[in-house]
Image (spheres, coloured by chain):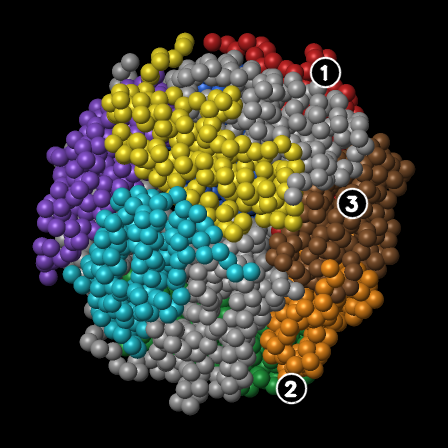
Chain colours: B purple, C yellow, E brown, F orange, G red, H blue, J cyan, K green
Amino acid sequence: MTAPSTPITSTLSDEQKEITGKALQETLVDLIDLSLIAKQAHWNVVGAQFRSVHLELDELVTVAREFTDAAAERATAIGVSPDGRAETVAKTAATKGFGEGWTKDADVVVSIVENLKAVIAGLRERIDVTEDADPVTQDLLIGFASKLEQLHWMWQAQVA
Amino acid sequence: MTAPSTPITSTLSDEQKEITGKALQETLVDLIDLSLIAKQAHWNVVGAQFRSVHLELDELVTVAREFTDAAAERATAIGVSPDGRAETVAKTAATKGFGEGWTKDADVVVSIVENLKAVIAGLRERIDVTEDADPVTQDLLIGFASKLEQLHWMWQAQVA
Amino acid sequence: MTAPSTPITSTLSDEQKEITGKALQETLVDLIDLSLIAKQAHWNVVGAQFRSVHLELDELVTVAREFTDAAAERATAIGVSPDGRAETVAKTAATKGFGEGWTKDADVVVSIVENLKAVIAGLRERIDVTEDADPVTQDLLIGFASKLEQLHWMWQAQVA
Amino acid sequence: MTAPSTPITSTLSDEQKEITGKALQETLVDLIDLSLIAKQAHWNVVGAQFRSVHLELDELVTVAREFTDAAAERATAIGVSPDGRAETVAKTAATKGFGEGWTKDADVVVSIVENLKAVIAGLRERIDVTEDADPVTQDLLIGFASKLEQLHWMWQAQVA
Amino acid sequence: MTAPSTPITSTLSDEQKEITGKALQETLVDLIDLSLIAKQAHWNVVGAQFRSVHLELDELVTVAREFTDAAAERATAIGVSPDGRAETVAKTAATKGFGEGWTKDADVVVSIVENLKAVIAGLRERIDVTEDADPVTQDLLIGFASKLEQLHWMWQAQVA
Amino acid sequence: MTAPSTPITSTLSDEQKEITGKALQETLVDLIDLSLIAKQAHWNVVGAQFRSVHLELDELVTVAREFTDAAAERATAIGVSPDGRAETVAKTAATKGFGEGWTKDADVVVSIVENLKAVIAGLRERIDVTEDADPVTQDLLIGFASKLEQLHWMWQAQVA
Amino acid sequence: MTAPSTPITSTLSDEQKEITGKALQETLVDLIDLSLIAKQAHWNVVGAQFRSVHLELDELVTVAREFTDAAAERATAIGVSPDGRAETVAKTAATKGFGEGWTKDADVVVSIVENLKAVIAGLRERIDVTEDADPVTQDLLIGFASKLEQLHWMWQAQVA
Amino acid sequence: MTAPSTPITSTLSDEQKEITGKALQETLVDLIDLSLIAKQAHWNVVGAQFRSVHLELDELVTVAREFTDAAAERATAIGVSPDGRAETVAKTAATKGFGEGWTKDADVVVSIVENLKAVIAGLRERIDVTEDADPVTQDLLIGFASKLEQLHWMWQAQVA
Amino acid sequence: MTAPSTPITSTLSDEQKEITGKALQETLVDLIDLSLIAKQAHWNVVGAQFRSVHLELDELVTVAREFTDAAAERATAIGVSPDGRAETVAKTAATKGFGEGWTKDADVVVSIVENLKAVIAGLRERIDVTEDADPVTQDLLIGFASKLEQLHWMWQAQVA
Amino acid sequence: MTAPSTPITSTLSDEQKEITGKALQETLVDLIDLSLIAKQAHWNVVGAQFRSVHLELDELVTVAREFTDAAAERATAIGVSPDGRAETVAKTAATKGFGEGWTKDADVVVSIVENLKAVIAGLRERIDVTEDADPVTQDLLIGFASKLEQLHWMWQAQVA
Amino acid sequence: MTAPSTPITSTLSDEQKEITGKALQETLVDLIDLSLIAKQAHWNVVGAQFRSVHLELDELVTVAREFTDAAAERATAIGVSPDGRAETVAKTAATKGFGEGWTKDADVVVSIVENLKAVIAGLRERIDVTEDADPVTQDLLIGFASKLEQLHWMWQAQVA
Amino acid sequence: MTAPSTPITSTLSDEQKEITGKALQETLVDLIDLSLIAKQAHWNVVGAQFRSVHLELDELVTVAREFTDAAAERATAIGVSPDGRAETVAKTAATKGFGEGWTKDADVVVSIVENLKAVIAGLRERIDVTEDADPVTQDLLIGFASKLEQLHWMWQAQVA
């Protein structure tokens, strides 16, 4: 009762599918890790700005989780099996990570800005490579970049 | 501007705090991994029961995420810094994992039952050890077990 | 295509399962009968306090139905098949019943107080016997007792 | 402080009231038993279609409970005391009942189709007898039949 | 710029239209007056049951206003201009009216029961006369009677 | 069981109460009649602007009904029994009334502007007389005038 | 794996089923076409009343779609397979159609009145023929006629 | 009072308008037919997966209707009159249609997958041709393709 | 890090500020005590009217709490620090208090009427003294009096 | 018409009732005072963190008020009359109080942490003493401690 | 088709209308500018308090926009055409403006306090001049002052 | 405490940032002025279509305000300080303005069509220039054009 290796057909050519699938898989692990980092920060932040940062991090978690699902389900839509398991995330995400233990609010802000910057940089590259391969996927990634660049400004504004 | 190592005081004794903190940390990584496994299954399931299983998995994700937050914030409440980062989850979770690629619906159901069983077993042990250490934490773990055992029945009923 | 007699496995030992299953089955029939009694009273009450009692009875119905479902699904969660059929209820419920035909508001209040008292008495006993057998079930029964004792006060306050 | 035997006057003649009251009382017990049967099935169903059947049964419970209340309150509106107590239901309902213990999904579907068929048959007869006796009650019973025949199709479609 | 006397055509014959239009106009004034009487009682009731009766009267107002609109718009639908002006209501309504000034709760209940009885009696007659003239209007009047007879029971139950 | 003639005490002197009570009673009948006129127009309007005027009239009904209740309950609050029965309205309202039968949209607009003007004129006078007698009532009447003058503009703008 | 030709049993006799099924199939295609016509008008209307007519047409679409579903599901409930495919609608609907291209608002109103009139005429005939064949279906058709006759008045009032 | 043939001006050149208008008109008829096919399947499906497929089809109907409106209103926005009448749909839609009568669930799934594939193929072509003609329309079509390809995966996953 | 004694500037003169600040502080303690009294009665009421009085008291609590906040925040807005601590309330409130222990429903009603009367009397005086000092505060106090006099009527009506 | 001294019977023994009643009464006054202190701080806080602290204090008020009601109604449920009057609170609460006048944000945070610590300490003791006396009450107190310890962490995190 | 210069009649005398109209026009431009200033600050604020100030500014925008509409529509209600165009605002508003480019959070707070102070000062004057001219307008301006003085405190509290 | 001149870093090159920043600033002032013009028209429109146009203008205001915020926050996201102050809008917006005083409905429609046309023309140009500079911003502007061209059709349809 094992599933066939390619049960879902694609409207893309094999080459387009490979390029697009790779872009979506890379995006997927970055976004899952971003959501785990934001939650980790949400619990471990301390300092006078605790409440503000604590709440803002949960909004970032919500965004990251919603985009995660959209990226994974776009992969399935083009016939590519997404991999969002803990080990895959731990090994392949291009994020900057988050330190251990209780963390001061100002340090949290700096860390989140860096992680957002890393995720956005990846998205910008993939927006380029998917332009010809699949405009539908490109449109999705543009949407992710638009929102994450807005958040990038908001977090950065706090250290300005 | 690094944070002090123990910025949050506890109403528990050191011993109670150590026992309870360990129980919560173990619960935390199990629940995060359960949510990642359920999402992985949500995307990769195929078969005639696709829609039913796909929807049910998202309900499990919602439960696992809510309990994750409750476990982590109970740890903070007793002065213990929780660790829910991808690498920590990948290395320390006591779950059964989930296979690679597209997966038949019946196989998904079996895998979820096994993962739930593993998580519940851990909870049952921790309900015992926290009884004296911290009845507040015990009450939380009882609540987790109650819901996860209900889901265990529902998933198991599909293979009966 | 008949179902296996024990299709749902339990995290309890056989003895714990027997004790807990019995407690839940007894609770189930009491609560179903309580909901039928409250509906019967809801339709047959007459007197100056009609509207107040009529509305209050529907709140009791809602509580009884919600607890009924929770008790039955806890039984399934420990691998015990619940029985909530009309005949089983009629024969085994430990409630006090309700008289025939139109009933004066003051008589309704007295009857509801007595029925609540009987159901609570059963719950209090089962809270004791499930303490060791299954703390998860005990916690559920404590929740039922808490709400029903609140309603017991409210109905009793009307005859004070 | 016992209530008078006929505290509620009727806009119907004695004969109309007797015919209509009998039709409503018979409908009442059928509907209560239908709701108890559907709940029993909701808890005891097992098999690959578990989730779908489990959810669908709760929709049937909701319908049966809503119609139960409407039937009982129509009886009161014409001055007839309705009787919906467990023993009355157990002894007088014209439904087909439901077997003991865990039940396979396909068997549940067949049982529900049969119970719906029996309840609808009773309603169809009572729609005839109430046409002259009370068009208001007839209209109510037509509404019940309309919905239950829709559900009859939906459950039957699963075994087609 | 005066409007033509019959700008709205009817799907009924002239005779059917006359019978139905008369039934709807009579119903309209009864329902408007019922809503004004219920509001008058809502403001002037005094006594230990004040709050219960005060709230219940507003529910009656809501019902009466909703039915008023339905009756008037059914008249327009068959090409008959409805007349719901104060003077028409004051002169032609077949209700029982309501006394002047502050009124004891028990007296209010009796007055509402009598007014409901009068309005229902009119509806019952018009259900007969519209059966052949217009089944669509008959169905509407059956709906009004169904609800008002339910309220008649509820108000009457308070004096039982 | 008749009610005492003055069961509700007042925080106003007898003279203040008489002046204020008269102002509120006059306002009450004007507002009830305004709501009946607006409903009458709602049903009888014809012409190209039918839909717009039909909807706008229901907004006027909502406003008039809400103010009616506020005026009557302010009278009760100062110990004055309000009288909003059909005959009282028909005989004492200072509104301009509404013609019989189907009415062209432009005529409806003119009639509503005139009725609003009449009701506002009454309110303006009563705002003056209640200034010393009861600032609480004056504040209420100012609120009525504010909203009705806004509607007066909106209806008038349609004939500009 | 083809379906049996009559998988759904009926509570009607063969003759009743044939009469009722024909009435519902005719109603179904009329209502689907009415919804397509209203959408076509919704997009193509121009003129000073554009906004009012544009919005009103969407309300008609909503009504037509809701009734379409109710008619089709009543057919299935009596064991008759409904046919609402584009070609069937195009060939068998008894509506009046709608012209090509942009259309002035006044012309739209006239066209909608004519289409409503045609659909209502069909319903009135089917209300007669289903009275003996199936009162449940008759009740449904009466409900359709009631609402469509109300809309017929509202659209007609605009050309009065 | 006939409307001018081109009452709505366009921000596009004549050539751009012709290309874009054709793409939108083709999309419009495909989407209307998709919604009618999905409804037809919604009513005629039978088999063990009835409930799941029945519900899923209504979600497809909702999507198809929403996109239909967006496509038609984009046509109007560029000055092109859309044609969504039954006959136009029946004659020009590039969908695969749906068979007559009751249909087994597995056959329904296959048919929906084929219809989705056909509609997506048309969209993919039109995304290319509108890139230069009108990026606003292209963006709309990309959005349609994104959602329909997601649904294509979900339906296809059921036959995997 | 102690705060300056007057950190918030005022738009009032010193004299106006003193008069207005005193009026608001007196109002504040009266309203807090009213909310505590109403809660105390909510818990301790017994008698046949229990449910009605119990619910009505919570509505009074809601009103008192909302007004409390408005009074305190008006004080801050004019630069006056409000004092709503338990001891200040216990020592300075001009309410009538509430007896110890379980209390009969009729006694509760009388006590609430007296407390409302006392609070209203204070407000009426402060409406006078703030007229020149601060019309904004006066308007707020008029709003409090308006609502509390309505409640005064409703509670008093129950003993009429 | 004075109430009997013990109108509400208890399911507890006299000793259990005395222990549990004392625990609940002490909890009640602590929670009322906590809500008054939080409100006092809500109004008097100044400083750069004003908005964050101001909002967070209202969340604490909401929690304290909800727990207050639960504690008082648990007392009534075991037949003990709760006392939450201002003077009782002022004299018996074991909280730390709050200083007079405008208060800097950092001082507010420290004061709230201290008050929470005091209330939690009392709860921890009462969780012990009610374990044997009444597990239902113990469960309630565990729930209070769980939430207040979470808040204790959040407020404390701001001074870390 | 130009409009008449005074199409809306007024219930005020010419002198009253001139005074009131001037007060409302001045208020209108101040409020529009306040909303534009708050939005400008909302986008350009930077600093550690970014998030708190950013959110708080949008609440100010909401208030300013709501009051703008109320002021303009009060002008129309008394027959005066309001002027809220960009150039009029730029030339006549009595606000303090807002600097160019990115702005530190503390500077934003100071600027908003100054702008609020200026707007409130204007309102206080106009409350005086409208007392005799139009109490309805005065009541509106009192409402504006009440809310803006509350916000003035809240913003000022952040610099205390 | 003055802010640095470029506190927010950008993911764009300097040239891309300049081009994109200019496009967004131009869009911002156009949209703010469009919202002020629509509000001005909302207040000053008179004529038979008053209500329809008055309501439709508020929908335009809502759209313009939402897009204003999106444009300004996109500017901040790429590190450019947006300028939406009244004077900047008055001097640099490329809209067509709106005449003084009361305005006939037909004139309002023409003016809004012209203003929409001007704003859309600007957007179309900027969609071209941002294609290479920043696809994320281009996507945003395409979204604005899509909605405003839909509104352009709707307003234009009223003069067809």
Residue K15, labelled with which disc?
2
**Measured from the top left, where is residue K81 in percent x and y?**
60, 74
Q: Is any part of residue K64 visible from this angle? A: no
Q: Are marks 3 and 2 on the same chain?
A: no
Instruction: Mark 3 and mark 1 in contact? Answer it, CB < 8 Å.
Output: no
**Measured from the top left, where is residue E69 in percent x and y?**
72, 49
Q: Which residue is mark 1?
A: G16
Side (left or right) of K125 relative to E117 = left
Mark 2 belongs to which amino acid? Glu
**Measured from the top left, where is residue B94 in percent x and y?**
16, 31
In this view, the residue in front, C51 or H71, is C51
Mark 1 belongs to which amino acid? Gln
Q: Chain of mark 3?
A: E
Q: Quadrant of residue G42?
A: top right
Mark 3 belongs to which amino acid? Lys
Instruction: Mark 2 and mark 1 in contact? Answer it, CB < 8 Å.
Output: no
Q: Residues within 10 Å of mark 3 (few under 14, many from 20)?
A: some
Instruction: Mark 3 and mark 2 in contact? Answer it, CB < 8 Å.
Output: no
In this view, the residue in front, K59 or H18, is K59
Q: Which residue is mark 3?
A: E117
